[in-house]
């Protein structure tokens, strides 16, 4: 696994008027990692992820994503990343295949490539039979899996997932994480936010946020060891009570 | 370029799947043309006239027969007192009252002059003004007859001296108000399609959240706006064609000028309206807001544009406001082409102003559409 730094953030600050959403965040993400961004609702996860994706301008700080500057090179960043938001991002009145074709097309993929790769994708997801069904007619879990697959369809270097498993049943969540693993194995860095602590166990490294600040960052094993607990849930409660190690 | 094609393809699929849209696209022009053109008529037919003939002489009866033989007037009754006349006007039973006083004929013969009074119900000022001028025409004609009859020598002497004014109405000789209205309704039609469909479509993507997914892709702003613009451009041109066909079938609407020119000017106008609609929607967060803003501009522009009354008869400041009113330009150009057969040189001013605004509105839409918040 390559160990080059793919996301580098130093002293990232984002203010909305007087409210500080991100307060001097600093972290590094290495290529091929699954990097988990944890925290309660309103901790500032989505704000940070939107800045990294070039959807929002940072107030101050040094931010490089895939080697590009988050102030001036947002368009280059966008070519190198995939993004799946907590809001539903597929067109409900298009079919499964039409969604794949549309997103593949606007990323500039060749028509032949789109055709062959979508066949392969539909087969892998077990969706070949429903390729011509409208998105609004398929279950939420399938939609989420499809949305994720479309986010990495153009082979980005990093994929950002903003609470991808919200409102999804446990079985589908497990299948979803299997997809994330496969993606990370293929060399795509995964940057994921969640508030499910069991999901944090799947990450190579986690970063816990609270009220706009990073309060803990390490691999799940080291965090558990450091706090002397057996699972990430307890780590989170200790962090939330301001216990340091 | 390929990117734009993918966006256009997606928009067309979505339009096709929209079950409400297609019927409405054909329903709107039908209703607007049939109802509005027929209802919003200012045609001077059947003006209800009540005669108050207190003279009851040969002269007064001749005058009355002049009115009754005109296609514009219908003698709906008679009355004999001023109170009756007032009541009739107040109850809207008549649009006009012609009051011929006692001794009308006697004065005419003895003094060579006599007065009559015309009372017009001016609740609808336009109708009152126009019917008044018709009355004047009829009385003038009567006057001439009187001179010929009683003072033939003077009439012959006056021949050649007096100015003889004969009005002829060009471009719409039958004063058919409907063919004046059809181009206006067509202009409103393409405006509705352009402003509402395109504008609401973009805001809808904002509401659903798909716009964020687009914003995180390398799609360029202008590509996205063009991709949104072209499908609705196409739809609006189909609307125009449908409207022109209906105009021909229902009202026998003449198209004196070139059809190509109609399409050319409308296409230019649509580019402007669509870009304007998209610009509005970049400013709005919800479909409700977009609807509200768009509606405001629609109403003001349509009312100012001269749908019902010619712009020339508006006060000066209102005419000045029309400098920034795109609908007014289109309406004028369409009427000129369809009724007068104007060629490109005649409508080039309208065309280039629309072009200028289109470029401006498109620039505003691209500028205002933010991929980064």
Image: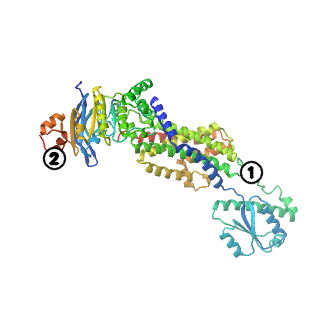
Q: CA distance from mark 2 to mark 1?
A: 93 Å
Residue in the picture at 85% in, 60% down = B155
Q: Quadrant of residue B136?
A: bottom right
List x then y, in percent, for residue B34.
64, 50
**SS under mark 2:** loop
Task: Report the side of B87 relative to B61 (left or right).
Answer: left
Residue in the picture at 34% in, 35% down = A83
Residue located farthest toward the right when viewing the structure as drawn: B153
Name the mark on residue A241: 2
**SS under mark 1:** loop
List x then y, in percent, for residue B91.
66, 70
* Front residue (pair B64, A229): A229
Residue A66 appears in the rendering: no
* Figure check: B175 above or below A24: below
Name the mark on residue B168: 1
List x then y, in percent, for residue A215.
18, 41
Residue B288 appears in the rendering: yes
């Amino acid at each position: 696994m390559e160990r080059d730094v793919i996301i580098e953030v130093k002293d990232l600050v984002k203010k909305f008027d007087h409210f500080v959403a991100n307060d001097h965040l600093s972290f590094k993400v290495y290529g091929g990692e699954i990097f988990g961004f944890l925290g309660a609702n309103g901790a500032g996860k989505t704000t940070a992820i939107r800045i990294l994706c070039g959807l929002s301008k940072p107030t101050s700080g040094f931010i490089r994503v895939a080697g590009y500057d988050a102030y001036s090179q947002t368009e280059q960043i966008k070519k190198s990343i995939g993004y799946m938001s907590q809001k539903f991002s597929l067109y409900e009145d298009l079919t499964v295949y039409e969604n794949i074709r549309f997103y593949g097309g606007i990323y500039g993929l060749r028509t032949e490539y789109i055709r062959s790769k979508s066949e392969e994708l539909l087969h892998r997801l077990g969706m070949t039979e429903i390729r011509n069904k409208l998105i609004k007619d398929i279950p939420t879990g399938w939609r989420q899996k499809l949305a994720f697959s479309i986010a990495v369809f153009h082979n980005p270097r990093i994929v950002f997932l903003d609470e991808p498993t919200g409102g999804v049943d446990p079985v589908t969540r497990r299948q979803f994480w299997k997809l994330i693993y496969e993606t990370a194995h293929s060399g795509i860095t995964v940057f994921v936010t969640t508030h499910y602590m069991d999901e944090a166990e799947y990450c190579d490294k986690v970063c816990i946020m609270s009220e706009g600040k990073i309060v803990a960052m390490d691999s799940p094993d080291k965090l558990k060891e450091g706090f002397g607990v057996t699972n990430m849930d307890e780590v989170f409660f200790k962090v939330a009570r301001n216990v340091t190690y | 370029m390929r990117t734009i094609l993918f966006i256009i393809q997606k928009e067309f699929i979505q339009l096709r799947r929209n079950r409400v849209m297609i019927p409405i696209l054909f329903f709107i022009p039908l209703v607007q043309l049939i109802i509005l053109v027929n209802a919003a008529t200012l045609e001077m037919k059947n003006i209800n006239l009540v005669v108050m003939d207190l003279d009851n002489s040969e002269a007064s009866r001749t005058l009355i027969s002049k009115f009754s033989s005109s296609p514009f007037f219908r003698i709906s009754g008679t009355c004999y007192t001023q109170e009756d006349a007032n009541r009739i006007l107040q109850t809207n039973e008549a649009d006009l009252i012609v009051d011929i006083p006692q001794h009308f004929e006697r004065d005419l013969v003895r003094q060579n002059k006599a007065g009559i009074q015309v009372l017009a119900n001016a609740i609808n000022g336009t109708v009152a003004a126009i019917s008044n001028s018709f009355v004047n025409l009829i009385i003038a004609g009567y006057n001439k007859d009187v001179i010929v009859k009683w003072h033939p020598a003077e009439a012959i002497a006056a021949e050649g001296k007096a100015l003889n004014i004969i009005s002829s109405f060009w471009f719409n000789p039958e004063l058919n108000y409907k063919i004046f209205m059809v181009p206006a309704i067509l202009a409103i039609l393409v405006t509705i399609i352009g402003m509402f469909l395109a504008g609401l479509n973009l805001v809808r993507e904002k509401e659903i959240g798909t716009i964020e997914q687009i914003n995180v892709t390398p799609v360029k702003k202008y590509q996205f706006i063009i991709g949104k613009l072209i499908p609705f451009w196409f739809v609006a041109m189909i609307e125009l064609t449908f409207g022109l066909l209906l105009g021909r079938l229902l009202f026998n609407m003449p198209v004196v000028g070139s059809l190509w020119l109609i399409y050319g000017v409308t296409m230019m106008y649509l580019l402007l309206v669509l870009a304007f609609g998209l610009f509005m929607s970049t400013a709005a967060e919800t479909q409700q807001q977009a609807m509200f803003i768009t509606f405001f501009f629609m109403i003001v522009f349509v009312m100012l544009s001269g749908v019902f009354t010619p712009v020339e008869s508006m006060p000066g400041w209102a005419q000045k406001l029309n400098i920034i009113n795109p609908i007014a330009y289109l309406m004028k150009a369409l009427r000129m082409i369809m009724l007068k057969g104007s060629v490109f040189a005649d409508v080039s001013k309208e065309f280039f102003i629309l072009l200028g605004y289109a470029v401006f509105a498109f620039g505003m839409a691209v500028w205002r559409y933010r991929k980064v918040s």
